[in-house]
Amino acid sequence: MKKIEQLRHNMTSLKSELSHIISTNKLFSIKQGVTVFMLFFSFLILLFTILYIKFNEYDSAIVSGVSFFLTYYLIISRYNSPNYAKVLVGWFYIFIFSLSVVLIMLFGWQSGGALFIITLMSFNYFLSINNKYRVIAIALAEVLFYVPFFYFCFEYLPNGIYTPSSDFLTFLFLLICFSNFAGLMFCVFLYSCIVSNSIKKLESENEDLANRAKYDYLTGLLNRRTIEELIALENLQKRGVNSFALIIGDVDHFKQINDTYSHDCGDLVLKQIAKNLLKTFRVSDKVCRWGGEEFMVFCENVTFEHAHILLERTRKNILSQKISYEEEFVQVSITFGAVFCDDLSKYNKAELIKQADLLLYEGKKQGRNRVVFKRANL
């Protein structure tokens, strides 16, 4: 019963995996590629079974039919095992090896069984991946077996044990040619899909990691390191910045919010303020989580008056927004300290940040929930 339950579980996993492959049209792993290939391989075995039945080769048809069901059984029974891919590829190799030997002995050279050697040689790599010595060893073993075997068959069994009809041999030869060509092409196609999609996945993951390095994980705003790079003098010159407002905002009584409602509420407040800042300021403006409950905004190519309007609008929007936390509304306000500069010849990043910070502190002393905005003293 336990074995049956395991097979059912594996069958469900296999169906889910195939549905995912069909819906996304993408392969990402060797396991997925092996699964699709072995299903295709089963289809080829089925073609051989049909051919044998058509020409009354019932003994061969029974063997081929058993191989068909054994392949499916291995796929299902081993699907969730750690050595799934190795077992299936190994079974494929053994089957093709045996098939080539049997076909040559039974039906002779005209059957085309020797053509399967091409497939075997190609699959040496998959059997011995990342181990070149094993690849060489298997290839040598094949040569040492096939050379005397071919010599024996050529001398003593040129036409095989049986002499089937010429139509059977023609169809068998064509089917073997098709199987070799289609199998190898399909394998190359699957492998290229896996490599291509894996590269895309890695690129996406690298891009995600790069974004994580640039942005604050909680608010989604630029982080401190990124904005410090963006407001370096050389970068301002590259972007053609002539005037700017450097703004630092601090959430009022943020510790009290955390103590009263919890840190989860504090996180929610920071997220809502971040959304408000992004909504109010322009796309070209750089909005950053400076640290803790502090935010920095760098408004590029803006006049003193326009920057002041944006700051007052932001302060009022934050004050008026209703942040709901566990059926309670949390009142939030923010204080801004900001400096304006329209002369890059005297630009000093550290000094400007210090001045904005002092103006923020001045706003806190004046009672919070206000904007203190002055021209930079450089």
Image (cartoon, rainbow, N blue to C red):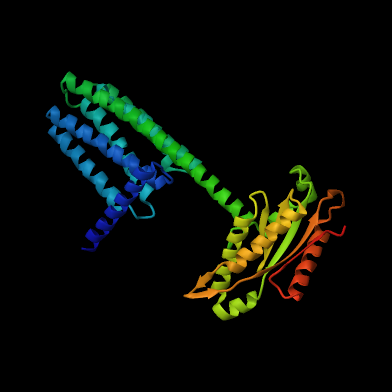
The front one of 7 and 358 is 358
The C terminus appears in which quarter of the rendering? bottom right
Counting every numbered tag in the picture gives 0
Residue at image point 70% right, 58% down: 309
The front one of 128 and 270 is 270
Question: Up-down: is 378 above or below 120?
Answer: below
Quarter of the image for residue 143 reads top left
The front one of 201 and 6 is 201
Residue 257 in view in this figure: yes
Residue 289 in view in this figure: no
* Left or right of residue 334: residue 264: left
Residue at image point 68% right, 57% down: 310
The front one of 357 and 315 is 315
- Give the x, y percent position of residue 264: 54, 72
- Give the x, y percent position of residue 156: 25, 24
The N terminus appears in which quarter of the rendering? bottom left
- Give the x, y percent position of residue 28: 43, 45
- Give the x, y percent position of residue 239: 74, 44
Q: Residue furthest bottom?
A: 260
Residue at image point 37% right, 43% down: 34
* Left or right of residue 362: residue 202: left
Quarter of the image for residue 96 reads top left
